[in-house]
Structure formats: C-alpha cells, structure tokens
Image: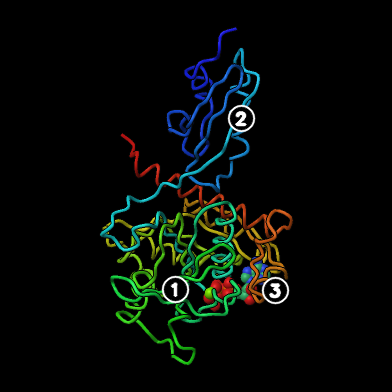
Amino acid sequence: MPNVSEAQVLDALRSIEDPDLHRDIVSLGFIKEIKICEGNVAFQIELTTPACPVKDQMKAEAESAVMALPGVTQVAIEMTASVRGRALSPQEILPGVRHVIAVASGKGGVGKSTVSANLAVALAKEGATVGLLDADIYGPSIPMMMGIRREPDVIKSESGPKMLPVLAHGVLVMSLGFILKSDQAVVWRGPMLGKAVNDMLTGCLWGDLDYLVVDLPPGTGDVPMSLAQLVPISGVVVVTTPQQVAQDIARKSIAMFRMLEQGTGKTIPILGIVENMSGGIFGSGGAEQSAKQLEIPYLGSIPLTQTVTLSGDTGYPAVLSGESTPEGSAFMRLARQLASQLSILHFENENPPE
Ligand SMILES: Nc1ncnc2c1ncn2[C@@H]1O[C@H](COP(=O)(O)OP(=O)(O)OP(=O)(O)O)[C@@H](O)[C@H]1O
Ligand SMILES: [Mg+2]
C-alpha cells in the first residue's frame, strides 16, 4: 500500500473545527511539523492558548480522523500552544506582554483578589507564562494570598533601577503593597495614582508574558483609567456575588468600562462575568442571568467554601489542588473559559467580518 501523503492528512484534519473560532484547524494554521514514516503519522497541533478548554477533545478527534485514512497504523499528536496577542513593539510599555487582563468588581469584598490570584496560578499551571499585578490601593492583599513575605529585588539597568517581580506558585507577582508603606494613608487619586500604576508597569522587569492579570481596586475608575492610558487592556473580567445588589453594582461597573476609552481610542472589551461565593447563603445563578441580559459571556462560578477562605489566609491558592477538589476544578474551568474568550477576541480583531 502506498504511503499516506501530507495532503491527505491535512484534508482529513480539515473536518475538525475549532469550536471557538468556528474555522477548521488546518486553515487556522494550527497543524505543524507533519512527519510521515510508512504508516506512522506524527504532527503538532499548536493552539492559541495552553489553557484551551477543548484540548483533549480536539486531540482525540484529530487522532481518529487521521487514523481513518487508509494505510495509517499509528498517529502521534503533540499539543502545543503559542499565545497570540497584541503586536509587540519595543517602543511600547510592556512590549513582551501579550494580554493584559483586568479583574474588576463594582463592590468590595466579592473575592476579586481571590479570583485574580487563582486565575493567574491556573493559567500558569496550564503552561502559560503569567504575571499578577496587584493594583489595589485600598488594601493590597495579593502578597498574602500568594504567600509572599519579602520585597522584590531591585537591579540596575540601562534605564535606571528596576524591580524584579517576585515568583510565587509559578507566577511573577508585583504589588502596590511593595511600594506603599504600610502606614501610608491611601487617599491617592488622579495623578498620584497614575504615577504609582506607571511605576509598577515601567519600573518593573516583566519580561515576556502570555498573560498579565491585574487585580483592580473596587469601584473607582481612577486606576483602570490610568492603566488603560498606559497599556492596552485586552479585556475586563467582572467578579460578582449572586445577590441582586451585587448584580446591580456589577452592571454599573460594566457600564463604566464600556465608556472608558483606552489610550488607543478603543473601549475595553468585557471578557465576561464570574459568580464568586456561589451556592452559599446568597444562592446562585444571579451572575449568569445578568450576563445574559447584558449580552456578555458568563465565565463560570466559584463555590463558597471554607477551603477558599483558608487558602487565602495561608498563601496557598485553592487552585493548586487542581482538578481533585471542587474549588480547584472551578478555578481551572474559569481560567480556560477566560483564555478562550481572549483567543476569540484576538481572532476577531485580526479577522474583522467583511
Ligand atoms: N469562593 C469563596 N469562598 C469562601 N471564601 C471566599 C471566596 N472568595 C473569597 N473569599 C474570602 O472572602 C474574603 C474577601 O475576598 P477578597 O479579598 O478576594 O475580595 P476582594 O473583592 O478582593 O476584596 P477587596 O474589595 O477588599 O479588595 C477573603 O477572606 C477571601 O478569602
Ligand atoms: Mg482585593
């Protein structure tokens, strides 16, 4: 029997569609390094994020599609990823950062920092390079949640001294808490705040990152505004709790982001809404309803559990337990949904409808 050809393999793979991008994986350019040796076929599928929610399903479909070709006896597929994000120009601030994800909430205490920390760790667990920036002026809590008990190192560079973000649980972390003295009253607004945000972005060596997760302070528009002027924000994740009041406030903050123009002149996309503390005394399902009404993606829910509370106090984010616990799998699912929303947005920006 003649060997199967590369063209036959690609043809077979054309039957597989990326469920988010609605295009087949061949025309999307995902198939790399096809190698054929007699009945053995090997190739890579390069996804747009290592946190792809349908990674295993896509691999299985590709395997059976190629296996079905006459003459094929074995298929070996390696799943890889290359996160595609904004075009990186060296003149920009954060030239190596592909996606800036802002985590926001209208109301304080809904678990924004908890979600930020666990999201960042989840994306890193999936194999992405991740930074976490704590931009909460009212009470930086990320260092504690990530178990960081030291200040960042400072090194000399051509453009002056730079801070090195602190590595914790696979994530590079920088916090306003490292800059603010603990007795400093945080009544900063406007220009002062802008300067602090600027310091954390430009005064810090972030290097190349697939995702930079930014924990925003609740309410105020000052920090997101400064941030948006300095770097293009890929999108905002809005955290809310299930009760009606929380929904109302979440809506207000979504309306604010929809009006906030970036330095680029574009508004900030809403990546979706997350229901935190779901299923406890507050009930559940409120955020999903709001998402429907506002026509934004619903990214998932995180249960209200003591494990999550304790993990925040001990500096060991709940998601570290991975799929083996309800909290861990909820955060992993959330990270994948978010990563796929970012891939979709980026793809739509690059391929505007004709
Ligand atoms: N899903 C959850 N289950 C149980 N406890 C949670 C959950 N999410 C957050 N918490 C706890 O609720 C408290 C508030 O969470 P967190 O600090 O993340 O909220 P926040 O929105 O960042 O608050 P702030 O507005 O003060 O910045 C913390 O003690 C945290 O451990
Ligand atoms: Mg917080």
Q: Position of residue 339 (x, y in %)?
A: 51, 50
The label shown at residue 161 is none
In the image, 46: left or right of 122? left
For the C terminus, the quadrant is top left
Badge 3 residue CB within 8 Å of ligand 1:
yes
Residue 310 shows which numbered tag? 3
Under mark 1, the amino acid is Ala
Label 3 element class: helix
Upstream in the sequence, badge 1 or badge 2? Answer: 2
Q: CA distance from mark 2 to mark 3?
A: 42 Å
Residue 273 vs residue 227, the one in the foreground? 227
Q: Amino acid at mark 2?
A: Ala
Mark sitting on residue 135: 1
Does residue 249 appear in the picture of this structure? no
- Pick out the residue farthest to the top: 1
Mark 1–mark 2 distance (CA, rounded to whole Å): 44 Å
Seen in the image, is 160 located left or right of residue 23?
left
Q: Say whether disc 3 or disc 1 marks the residue closer to the N-terminus.
A: 1
Q: Residue at x 34, y 36 (%)?
A: 353
In the rendered image, residue 107, in percent from the top left (x then y), is placed at 51, 73
**Residue found at x 57% / y 65%:** 115
